[in-house]
Image (cartoon, helix red, strand yellow):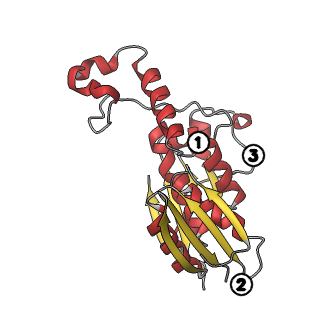
Amino acid sequence: MQEKKLAIIATKGSLDWAYPPFILASTASALGYETEIFFTFYGLQLLKKQLALEVTPLGNPGMPMPMSMDKWFPVMLTALPGMQGMMTSMMKKKMASKGVASLEELRELCQEAEVRLIACQMTVDLFDMPTSEFIDGIEYAGAARFFEFAGESDICLYI
Amino acid sequence: MADFDSELDASGLNCPLPILRAKKTLAPMEVGQVLHIIATDPGSVKDFEAFAKQTGNELMESKEEGGKFHFLIKKA
């Protein structure tokens, strides 16, 4: 069986959007895909050693709120200080109680499965991000490097 | 349920962990050996079918018993 290839671009840096790239990449590699994730802009937050990702109810009408909060909370109140932290901790608790893996665990599984993680060099420079804050075993490269792999891929996702 | 060589209890774990753990458990096993997986995630039923189809490992049995899902996978 010839190995299939999956190329993913991860562009978002929130707790909820951090899951799809790592879930899909780890699953794909378990199915025998050769997999690469290119992290750009806010997606670079997913490569930090200390993940400090949050989820926000602000401007997100699709987010299920606990205790029917969305029924009696006007949209504007979701912008209140502390709301984001509260929603983040509630989301993390919910995920743990449902047996959903932590991001750290999924990321580690990806690295174990030899999913290649590539940080966008331009973004690192743009935001003056110290590379010491990133996990080991990643590659720093540009758009051309992404196409080298993506051009040969069977599936290419922009997340 | 037929005989098996290894067992993996993935109860309480959600997608994609049962698949990832199964892959890891199968890795050091010999060709022809059988892995028994126990899971509680209802999505794992379709997922293990898809896993077997795409990796070539044979899904010998898939059943629900006592609120849990049981799979037998033979390593190819």
Give the label on residue B21, or none: none
Residue ID at (47%, 69%): A155
Q: Nearer the viewer, residue B57 or A73?
A: B57
Mark 1 touches mark 3? (CB < 8 Å): no
Real-space CA distance between mark 3 and mark 2, rounded to the nearest whole angstrom:
37 Å
Give the label on residue B32, or none: 2
Q: Chain of mark 2?
A: B
Residue ID at (67%, 72%): B35
Q: Is residue A80 above or below residue B46?
A: above
Amino acid type at circle 1 is: Ser
State the image coordinates of residue B59 (x, y, percent, origin top left). 56, 78
Crowding near the residue tagged with mark 3, few <14, some 14–19, many ≥20 C-alpha atoms within 10 Å: few
Amino acid type at circle 2 is: Gly
Q: Nearer the viewer, residue A128 or A9?
A: A9
Relative placement, left or right, of A36 versus A63 is right
Q: Chain of mark 3?
A: A
Res. A35 visible in picture: no
Real-space CA distance between mark 1 and mark 3, rounded to the nearest whole angstrom:
19 Å
**What secondary structure is marked by label 1?**
loop
Relative placement, left or right, of A59 versus A20 is left
Q: Residue B43's image quarter? A: bottom left
Give the label on residue A102, or none: 1
User: Which mark is first along the chain, 3 or 1?
Assistant: 1
Q: Is residue A127 above or below residue B5?
A: above
Query: Looking at the image, is mark 1 or mark 2 nearer the viewer?
Result: 2
**What secondary structure is marked by label 3?**
loop
Q: Chain of mark 1?
A: A
Real-space CA distance between mark 1 and mark 2, rounded to the nearest whole angstrom:
33 Å
Q: Which residue is mark 3?
A: A136
Residue ID at (25%, 27%): A70
State the image coordinates of residue A157 (x, y, percent, origin top left). 45, 60
**What secondary structure is marked by label 2?**
loop
